Amino acid sequence: MNGIHDMGGMHGMGPIRYEENEPVFHEPWEGRIFAITIALGAWKRWNIDAGRHTIEQISPADYLRMSYYEKWLARNIALSVKHGLVTQQEIDVGRPAPGSTKATPPLTSANLGPAVAPRPGYARPEADAKARFSVGDRVRARKSNPPGHTRLPRYVRGREGVVDRHRGVFVFPDTNAHFHGEDPQHLYSVRFRAQELWGESASPKDSVYLDLWDGYLERA
Amino acid sequence: MDAPHHKHDHQVIPSDPALRTKALESLLVEKGLVDPAALDAIIDAYENKIGPRNGARVVARAWVDPGYKERLLRDAGPAIAELGYSGAQGEHMVALENTPAVHNLVVCTLCSCYPWPVLGLPPVWYKSAPYRSRAVIDPRGVLREFGTELAEDVEIRVWDSTAEVRYLVLPERPPGTGNMTEEELAALVTRDSMIGVAKIAAPRGVEA
């Protein structure tokens, strides 16, 4: 979706606000909602792409107003309701519905390893996907505007680059976010010259590299 | 909010995110969906164990051990795991070497992708609109905001983490550190240098 989250190349967002000796969490609730995100993820009712897409669907004005972890709070509530872990009524009253049974959490302090250990990852080396491109190929990012989740930023669409590295076969976020299957595809690191993206005012020395799935690309 | 005509307001959850988080956690715990002790342990891990000191040890090892550096640049995941670091958001690691001629800078324009096992959780500025919007279109201006001035002839490579690949910048070893131990070198390595927004200053008393 062409959302506010896709902000590469925008102007007007102001100076970078740097904080010396920044704490990991500024307030205890930020740590709680971070940990809740991981603990709820262990139910495997959704995936990271669906999680990202949920945040993308926050309205642009709210997205810019809300702090980072406020967005995570909204994401967890939305996903938990949508995927049946809780009901909106339970969220509204703050208590389990009368007569609801108590579940057993998949993630406990005793089996915490999986929370911080590597997750299965998104590489699918065994998948039978065809690589349409090889290192050195000139490619163009497709001019597409999918209304759903995508990891193809607007600022590269229609632009030409060169395949710099082959990364392997990875789960395709555009389908995975909507539970339409993993559709594993080859992933390439593609180099775009800064002047191709931004025009002649950009430095001729500079470039931007993006990891792009096979389906995002066409031959240039 | 306390006015009588708001008595039947449907907004019964307090707007304060701290209160709303507390309400959510207590509901999730009562329903048996999350274990509060697991939440404590996750917070402890990211506050105390998983952070940029891990990445600094990787960098220092690469500076002193050419064989390790070669492995790190060829396939970063296993090389990082040699030092005991692996985990969520570090499943597909790539290391990028900064040299006098090439400067690498990492961003996630679409959200907040960051290599947790080596750098911990990202600072607020990394996740914020100013950095995400400008790192790709004006990397030299962004670097200047961090006090990093690069010569015109230095090539800047900006890495937008659009997929599940996560990047660690291997910064240049500062001058005047030839006699330092690996541990002393690790203490010089900053989080910002491993994102690529800063270089590492020479230790005090050494002219760069």
Image (cartoon, coloured by chain):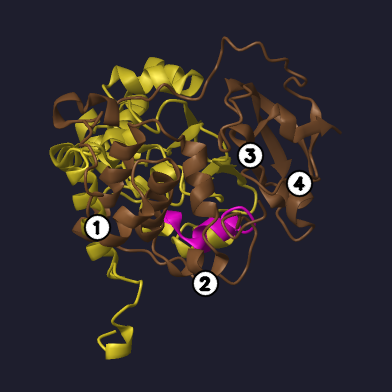
The stretch in magenta equals: B126-140
> In the rendered structure, the residue with mark 2 lies on which chain?
A
- The residue labelled by disc 1 is A94
Whether tag 2 and tag 3 are in contact, CB under 8 A, the answer is no
The mark nearer the N terminus, 2 or 4, is 2
Give the spatial CA distance, label 1 vs label 3.
Answer: 45 Å
> In the rendered structure, the residue with mark 4 lies on which chain?
A
Residue A34 part of the magenta segment:
no
The mark nearer the N terminus, 4 or 3, is 4
Residue drawn at x 56%, y 33% is A179
**Which is closer to the viewer, label 4 or label 3?**
4
- The residue labelled by disc 3 is A209
Residue drawn at x 21%, y 57% is B22
Q: Position of residue A140 (x, y in %)?
A: 80, 37
- Give a yes or no on whether discs 2 and 4 share a subunit: yes
Q: Position of residue B182 (x, y in %)?
A: 24, 29
- SS state under label 3: strand
Tell which chain the image draws in yellow.
B
Q: Which mark is residue A14?
A: 2
- SS state under label 2: loop
The residue at the far right in this view is: A220
Give the spatial CA distance, label 2 vs label 4.
Answer: 25 Å
